[in-house]
Image (cartoon, rainbow, N blue to C red):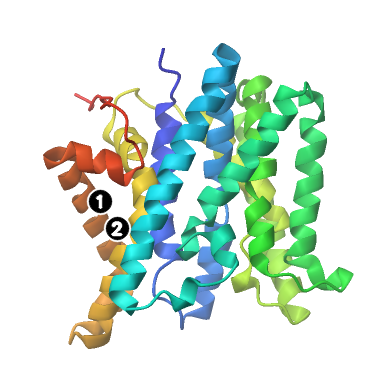
Amino acid sequence: MDHRSASVDAFRLLAACLVFFCHSIYTSQASLLTLLGLLGRWIIPFFFLVSGYYFQKSYTRQPRYAFSKIAKGLLAVTLFVNLFYLAFIGLVEGSLVTIANHFTLLVGTYFHLWFLTSMMLGYIVLWFLLTFGLERLMPNVAAVFLLLILSLAPYNTLFGLSPHPMYARSLLSIPFLCIGFLIARHALDTTVSTAVSWLLIGVGIGIQIAESRWLASHGSDPLKVNFLGGTLLLSAGMFLLSLQVSMANQNWLSYYGRRYSFSLYLYHPVVNYFLYEAYKTSTLGAIIYWMSPLLALATMLLLLIGVDKFAPPLFRILNGDFSQPRLVRKPG
């Protein structure tokens, strides 16, 4: 039985599209990057919330199968995508020296793949809690890890610490997988009103603005921070809203979100790289610069749609799926 939400899948597409703006080449536009940071920090926590939410539904029906499926899928995609970027770095840089360090174990072979290693760590924690009957501790675990993440970055200076920000990122999936799981367990999307969801979003953005100003006044660069205290409220509000929006079960936004959002995230740096190279040498540099997020998004989406249509086995492999094909029905 399909328990997917069309509106959640549409929000997944929105989140994947925003990634292209947040990882764009606007490196010299501090004010624009600040705005993108305020509006885009919810993206990765949102994906973790979605995963935890649907995992709970699968776990309720078939506990062993749920863990087996997620473990096989995560291991397969993590292995393949890291090998892909290992080859990509070798081709474009001619050397692997840049990734010859211990952070590669946390991040993966490319900067954005920390999402996958964090996800694996989060599911190990979920497995431990559920296998040993400790589900009642899940809210406490989420709270402790949220405090730990904020203590590692960006509020580490309050405690005289200077850890690499990657340690905080690597833990990020744990609280949000737990929160997504608990939202599904207690059906909070049906008990929390849409007005409350919007309130969470607004308050979350406001708190992030205050935090960013405070960090800047104390010598920290908020542009380098992936998660703030207000991000929790913003992410939760966006996720609850995605569950509450009324949307037809079959529509193009949800279909593209379900089919392509993951691969858009996985492979967007490849298109960004070649677009940046074109920007440096083309006479249309200014146009490419300002249009780069939309150009990269359109190019990546068209490539994925083309591969999906004309080479379905390759599309599945790119997503780490080595199983038999499973159709996702297009809207009529």
Contact between marks 1 and 2 (CB within 8 A): the answer is yes
Q: Position of residue 113 (x, y in %)?
A: 48, 56
Mark number, residue 88: none
Q: Is residue 22 above or below residue 116?
A: below
Q: What residue is shown at x 34% (from left), y 24% (from top)?
A: 248
> Between marks 1 and 2, how big is the CA–CA gap?
6 Å
Quadrant housing residue 52 = top right
Give 260 or 216, whichever is nearer the viewer: 260
**Image check: 9 left or right of 61?**
left
Q: What residue is shown at x 37% (from left), y 44% (from top)?
A: 261
Q: Position of residue 268 (x, y in %)?
A: 35, 59
Look at the image and tell me whether residue 157 can be seen.
yes
Please, what secondary structure does the residue beneath circle 2 have?
Answer: helix
Mark number, residue 301: 1
Image quarter (top left, top right, bottom left or bottom right) of the C terminus? top left
Q: What residue is shown at x 77% (from left), y 23% (from top)?
A: 132
Q: Is residue 328 above or below residue 105?
A: above
Quadrant housing residue 174 = top right
Look at the image and tell me whether residue 287 can be seen.
no
Q: Position of residue 139 (x, y in %)?
A: 78, 34
Give 220 or 169, whichever is nearer the viewer: 169
Q: Which residue is mark 2?
A: 297
Instruction: Please state which amino acid type lies under the numbered disc 2.
Output: Leu
